[in-house]
Image (tube, coloured by chain):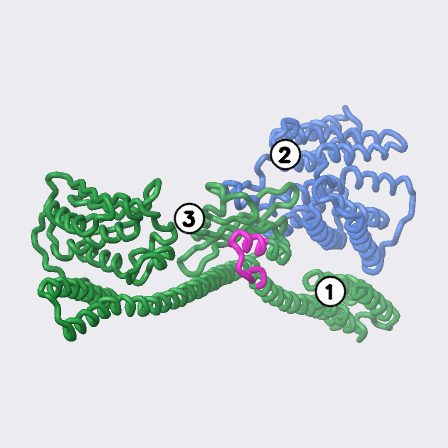
Chain colours: A blue, B green
């Protein structure tokens, strides 16, 4: 028991401790270089998308690994490693028909790098994963209904290849990196210092900002307001799920379920 | 079942709202309050989620109206309904949580009292408390309580130096550690001093993978104060029980002692009557003879000598009675102190007895020179004669009685021993031989006496500031050792 056995040392880890700034700057420079090369017509425009996706999601995944590192040397280069994995997935998905399957690579890679996030510690029950999936699904359906009633958007059911590509992107990059960074790293780190409401507020705020800054999100006022509302609810639920189970699977399942439904929304 | 009922109610109300002409202002919207309040009262905090669900279900009716009509009265009604649903959910949940928390606290206090019932060692009581609190608080519990010079611990082997509990025990401060380890879920650790006022008797440690909020920490401080009182009460109750048992034992022993003294006194009265009758019978017989017959002068002298001896014996018995009376009143015998030549006193007493008793071999060994004593010579003479007389009386004829006197230094004193070759005294009787009326079991049948001699001897020795003790010697016999302070 800590109170009887361990020396009384009040650990004060700042929120940004252990951030691999060097790797982040390197990635930013790489993205800038690709953009410049693209503007000069030296690389295809699609490369900017691939590099941007790899840099953004790789940074989130890599920082999550660095913040939760227990001192392994490999974690120092986690950002570059994650960016490489996402880049492989994104470029394969863009280049090959059926390449979306490559988005299975990042979750598999993350499961190997942080098995504790999945279930070795606080293994979530099937009920917890099922419940969180229902939660995400319900929230997504509500979004569809609200958007249909208020903005006149309707449900799209095709083309199926587009939908599958989006779902694969959510599975292997979008939801994966968001939950790894905002729940398993940021929320966990904040929760070590403050009570749940404060830690959740930081995590929710940061994840909403991240989505609002996402260039792939439609930027009409109604869509931004709706996204902020639903993503805040999703993030709050996911913080609670992570704090409750200690596993990343339930919030990951909730996020996936939400985005699976969200991708059915035809914005035009 | 209640959960399913609540979900069904939400669904039915939403359908009814959808079927109504104007969902926003339909009276059915108020029906949402029923499942919201029920869920909040039944589930507490998580019940508020039902309020959020109700708002989400009602929102598709309000938001299109907002888009269509702008901030109209209808929309305002809808927004007020949002606020009321959230408010009633939060308020009902807060009430339910408060009531449950209060009930849990009372139940915990009762459980703490129950776990301390009965007289058990502190370590066992702490283990019971730990089990009780762990299940009640859904946390890992550690307890450390001062037990004399040690610290009794439950929940660990010992209190490590510089640990949180050690800090709380030494300073009496409350410590909250927000990050006490844990892999994906941080463990919280809260340690409260167990104490009443300034006195810290221990520490209560709570650890959990999850929050220990300010309200719970305040409640835990109250619990720690209650634990202090409960432990102190248990300790006092145990002490009171022990006192009662000791008192009962003492009363029983005193009663037995009184009964023993009463028995000894009865025996003593019978014995004293017999002892008095013997010289009285002799005196009566010889005085009648002198009164009724004529005797030759030599015979009269012989009878006179016998009568004088018996009178002296009678006087000695009466003197013992007087000493006993003083002894029982707790008075020291009167002494006429002066400087006494120890060697002369001991040798005179022994010589006198040697002349009178020829059945035993009386040896005497005296250091030369022996220091002088500041004592009452008559009292000391009586002491020595009594000890030598006892040695002769309680050892078989023909055996040797040895009297020694030695000088002792630091502190300066004289040690006189009288050793016989008799059967000795039973070990159980040794501590009691100086008690009044007490006579060893074997002695009563074979040898006469009142059982007062050694008690009187001890009172005289005590009055001189000396000490006396009895011991058995090998192979058989008894040694009486008398130590008297010498003149410096």
- In the picture of the structure, the residue carrying the numbered disc 2 is A69
Between marks 1 and 3 in the image, the one whose residue lies nearer the viewer: 3
A127 is higher (above) or lower (below) than B323: above
**Camera-nearest residue between B241 and B211:** B241
Indicate the chain on which mark 2 is placed.
A
> Does B443 sit left or right of A136 as displayed?
left
Mark 1 or mark 3, which has the lower sequence index?
A: 1
Task: Give the residue drawn at x 46%, y 42%.
Answer: B162
Callout 1 touching callout 2 (CB < 8 Å) = no
Q: Seen in the image, is B436 located left or right of residue A150? A: left
Chain to which mark 1 belongs: B
Number of numbered callouts drawn: 3
Q: Would residue B46 appear left or right of B450 to someone viewing this image? A: right
Point 44% across, 60% down: residue: B196
Q: What is the spatial separation of the Cα atoms under label 1 and label 3, in whole angstroms? A: 57 Å
Q: Main secondary structure of the magenta part?
A: helix
Task: Decide if residue B229 is in sight here.
Answer: no
CA separation in Å, label 2 and label 3: 44 Å
Residue that mark 1 sits on: B51
């Amino acid at each position: 028991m800590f109170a009887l056995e361990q020396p009384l040392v009040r650990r004060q880890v700042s929120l940004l401790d252990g951030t691999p700034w060097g790797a982040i700057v390197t990635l930013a420079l790489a993205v800038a270089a690709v953009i410049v090369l693209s503007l000069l017509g030296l690389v295809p425009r699609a490369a900017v998308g691939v590099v941007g996706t790899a840099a953004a999601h790789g940074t989130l995944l890599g920082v999550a690994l660095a913040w939760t590192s227990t001192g392994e040397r490999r974690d120092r280069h986690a950002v570059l490693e994650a960016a490489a994995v996402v880049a492989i997935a994104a470029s394969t998905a863009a280049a090959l028909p059926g390449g979306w399957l490559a988005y299975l690579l990042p979750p598999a890679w993350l499961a190997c790098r942080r098995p504790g996030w999945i279930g070795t510690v606080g293994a979530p029950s099937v009920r917890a994963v099922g419940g969180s999936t229902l939660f995400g699904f319900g929230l997504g359906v509500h979004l569809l209904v609200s958007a249909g009633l208020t903005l006149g958007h309707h449900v799209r059911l095709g083309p199926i290849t587009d939908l599958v590509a989006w779902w694969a992107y959510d599975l292997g990059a979008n939801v994966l990196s968001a939950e790894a960074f905002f729940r398993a790293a940021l929320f966990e780190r904040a929760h070590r210092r403050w009570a749940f409401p404060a830690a959740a507020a930081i995590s929710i705020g940061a994840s909403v900002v991240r989505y609002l800054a996402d260039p792939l999100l439609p930027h009409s006022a109604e869509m931004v307001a709706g996204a902020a509302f639903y993503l805040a609810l999703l993030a709050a639920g996911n913080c609670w799920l992570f704090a409750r189970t200690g596993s990343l699977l339930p919030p990951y399942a909730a996020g996936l379920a939400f985005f699976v439904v969200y991708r059915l929304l035809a914005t035009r | 079942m209640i959960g399913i009922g609540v979900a069904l109610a939400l669904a039915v109300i939403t359908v009814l709202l959808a079927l109504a002409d104007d969902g926003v202002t339909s009276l059915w919207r108020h029906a949402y309050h029923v499942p919201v309040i029920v869920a909040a009262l039944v589930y507490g905090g998580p019940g508020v989620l039902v309020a959020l669900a109700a708002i989400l279900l009602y929102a598709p009716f309000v938001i299109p109206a907002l888009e269509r009509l702008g901030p109209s009265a209808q929309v305002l009604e809808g927004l007020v309904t949002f606020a009321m649903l959230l408010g009633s959910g939060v308020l009902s949940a807060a009430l339910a949580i408060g009531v449950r928390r209060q009930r849990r606290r009372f139940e915990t206090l009762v459980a703490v009292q129950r776990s301390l019932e009965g007289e058990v060692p502190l370590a066992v009581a702490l283990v019971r408390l730990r089990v009780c609190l762990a299940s009640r608080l859904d946390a890992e519990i550690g307890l450390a309580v001062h037990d004399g010079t040690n610290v009794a611990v439950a929940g660990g082997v010992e209190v490590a130096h510089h640990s949180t509990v050690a800090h709380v025990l030494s300073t009496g401060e409350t410590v909250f550690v927000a990050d006490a380890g844990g892999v994906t879920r941080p463990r919280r650790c809260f340690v409260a001093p167990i104490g009443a006022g300034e006195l810290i008797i221990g520490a209560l440690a709570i650890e959990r993978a999850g929050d220990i909020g300010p309200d719970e920490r305040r409640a835990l401080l109250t619990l720690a104060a209650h634990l202090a009182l409960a432990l102190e009460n248990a300790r006092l109750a145990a002490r009171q029980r022990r006192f009662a048992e000791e008192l009962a034992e003492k009363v029983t022993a005193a009663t037995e002692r009184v009964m023993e003294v009463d028995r000894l006194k009865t025996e003593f009265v019978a014995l004293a009557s017999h002892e008095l009758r013997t010289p009285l019978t002799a005196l009566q017989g010889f005085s009648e003879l002198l009164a009724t017959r004529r005797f030759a002068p030599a015979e009269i002298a012989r009878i006179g000598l016998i009568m004088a001896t018996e009178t002296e014996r009678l006087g000695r018995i009466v003197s013992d009675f007087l000493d006993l009376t003083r002894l029982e009143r707790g008075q020291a015998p009167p002494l006429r102190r002066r400087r006494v030549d120890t060697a002369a006193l001991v040798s005179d007493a022994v010589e006198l007895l040697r002349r009178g008793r020829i059945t035993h071999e009386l040896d005497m060994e005296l250091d030369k020179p022996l220091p002088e004593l500041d004592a009452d010579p008559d009292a000391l003479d009586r002491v020595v004669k009594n000890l030598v007389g006892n040695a002769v009386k309680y050892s078989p004829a023909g055996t040797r009685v040895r009297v020694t006197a030695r000088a002792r230094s630091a502190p300066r004193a004289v040690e006189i021993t009288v050793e016989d070759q008799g059967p000795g005294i039973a070990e159980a009787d040794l501590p009691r031989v100086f008690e009044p009326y007490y006579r060893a079991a074997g002695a009563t049948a074979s040898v006469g006496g009142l059982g007062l001699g050694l008690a009187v001897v001890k009172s005289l020795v005590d009055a001189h500031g000396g000490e006396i003790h009895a011991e058995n010697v090998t192979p058989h016999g008894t040694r009486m050792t008398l130590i008297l302070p010498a003149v410096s």
